[in-house]
Image (tube, rainbow, N blue to C red):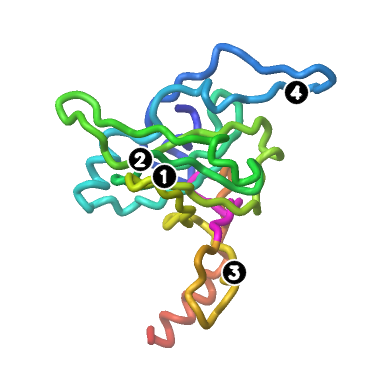
């Protein structure tokens, strides 16, 4: 995968998996740029070592592996989604950009490789958009889960970078969507630069609370 920063970059994202790029393009007359098909990107997004760390409970950078992240694969920018739903029949990503249609972006079950074998409990998908400006930052999204009992639920992303403001502060809402965030330092080419050195020094001088 080519979405990861180099070793000398300020941001350090997880190892990542192997994603084979599509061998075709979808073009529509009178449209200048091709459409990018999520089904054309075959492979896996999480490395075996990341799944090992996740399942063992010792994955300090789990939020960099799961959730939603803007990445680049083969020069095409898109969103990388991964979530944990071991008892789901199937899972799809729904949001403003696909009209909350569960048929648009079905996620793939991640099975373990080699002697480990079996379903890892993780679901993943790469949703391509094209250029960086095509990424729908600010759109709301969630995971549509079809349960073993045959019911459909839409759940927020527990590893989302941003969340929708709750609609009711006094009662637990049925659903508040996650938000596609552009503030993702582990994957941005230019991470946020902190300028609070003076304040940090003053805090040390005063003593921590």
Return the disc, 3 or 4, that comes first in the chain's sequence: 4
Return the disc, 2 or 1, that comes first in the chain's sequence: 2
Up-down relation of residue 134 to residue 179 (above or below): above
Indicate the quadrant containing the C terminus: top left, top right, bottom left or bottom right: bottom left
Residue 120 image offset from top left, x and y in percent: 26, 38
Q: Which residue is mark 1?
A: 146
Specify the segment rendered in magenta.
177-187
Q: Helix, strand, or loop for circle 4?
A: loop
Work out whether residue 174 can be spotted: yes
Q: Which residue is mark 4?
A: 33
Q: Which residue is mark 2?
A: 89
Q: Which mark is residue 61?
A: none
Disc 2 and disc 1 in contact, CB within 8 angstroms: yes
Residue 126 image offset from top left, x and y in percent: 50, 33
Instruction: Tell me, yes or no, whether the highlighted magenta stretch contains residue 138.
Output: no
Q: Helix, strand, or loop for circle 2?
A: strand
Q: CA distance from mark 2 to mark 1?
A: 6 Å
Indicate the quadrant containing the N terminus: top left, top right, bottom left or bottom right: top left
Q: CA distance from mark 3 to mark 1?
A: 26 Å
Dot 3 alpha-carbon crowd within 10 angstroms: few under 14, some 14 to 19, many 20 or more: few
The foreground one among 53 and 151 is 151
The foreground one among 16 and 150 is 150
Q: CA distance from mark 3 to mark 2?
A: 30 Å
Q: Does the magenta stretch mainly form a helix, a strand or a loop?
A: loop
């Amino acid at each position: 995968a080519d979405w990861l920063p180099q070793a000398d970059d300020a941001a350090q994202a997880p190892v990542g998996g192997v994603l084979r790029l599509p061998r075709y393009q979808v073009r529509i007359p009178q449209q200048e740029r091709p459409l990018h098909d999520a089904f054309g990107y075959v492979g896996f997004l999480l490395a075996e070592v990341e799944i090992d760390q996740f399942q063992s409970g010792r994955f300090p950078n789990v939020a960099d592996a799961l959730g939603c992240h803007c990445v680049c694969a083969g020069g095409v920018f898109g969103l990388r989604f991964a979530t944990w739903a071991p008892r789901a029949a199937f899972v799809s990503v729904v949001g403003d950009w696909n009209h909350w249609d569960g048929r648009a972006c079905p996620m793939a079950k991640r099975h373990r490789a080699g002697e480990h074998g079996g379903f890892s409990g993780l679901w993943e998908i790469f949703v391509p958009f094209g250029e960086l400006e095509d990424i729908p930052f600010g759109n709301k999204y969630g995971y549509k889960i079809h349960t073993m009992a045959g019911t459909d639920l839409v759940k927020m992303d527990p590893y989302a970078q941003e969340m929708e403001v709750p609609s009711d502060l006094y009662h637990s809402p049925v659903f508040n969507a996650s938000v596609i965030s552009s503030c993702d330092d582990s994957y941005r080419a230019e991470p946020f630069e902190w300028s609070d050195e003076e304040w940090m020094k003053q805090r040390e001088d005063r003593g921590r609370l």
